[in-house]
Amino acid sequence: MPSTIGKLTALLTMMHDHAMGADIVRKLEADGYRHTVGKVGSMDSAKVIAAIETAAKNNRVIDEKRYRETHGLYHAILEALQGVSRGTPQIRDVLRTVGLTFAIVRGPMSTEQDQPDEGEWICVCMYGTIGAPKKGFEHEVLGFGINHI
């Protein structure tokens, strides 16, 4: 099983509702990672950002009273959203809508014994669809972002 924050976040995003998802959650919890999974659909990128921030705060992945934690999360979300939207994170302006599952994971970069302590990191992965706001006019998309806390 992979032991880096990025691999675990990507796997959790795409496999959380499959049998392998329980193994990923056990690995995350055994290694001391904080995590959550959620869903969001919107034509407004601000609503996507807000949904992910809210999930991180409500599930205690970050402490909303600590600016650095919110700031690190925000940059990880923007990086992932750029991947989803292929550059500039605009959705409504170009008549696009997204339906996304997202995972947020916080902890060390790696749990390997030979890795030096690099502090805590936060990782956001989004998987779902993007397309015109009409059923059947969308395609799969994946976005990924990581930032230090």
Image (cartoon, rainbow, N blue to C red):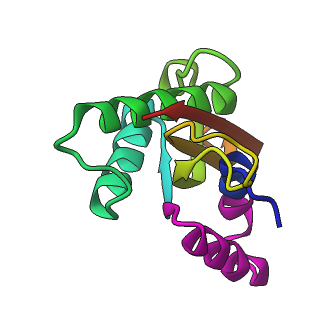
Point 54% across, 27% down: residue: 91
- Magenta-drawn segment: 11-35
x, y percentage for residue 89?
Answer: 54, 22
Horizontal side, residue 118 vs residue 128: left or right = left
Counting from the top left corner in percent of width and height, residue 28 is at 60, 68
Which of the two residues, 7 or 143, is positioned nearer the viewer here? 7
Magenta stretch: includes residue 22? yes
Q: How far from the left and from the top, in percent, is residue 22? A: 67, 82
Residue 15 appears in view? yes
- Whether residue 41 sits left or right of residue 70 in the image: it is right
* 15 in relation to 139, above or below: below
Quarter of the image where the C terminus is located: top left
Where on the picture, by quarter, is residue 23? bottom right
Q: Is residue 103 above or below residue 30?
A: above
Most common SS among magenta residues = helix
Residue at 22 percent across and 45 percent down: it is 64
Residue at left 59%, top 75%? 30
Provide residue 62's location: percent of width, then percent of height: 33, 50
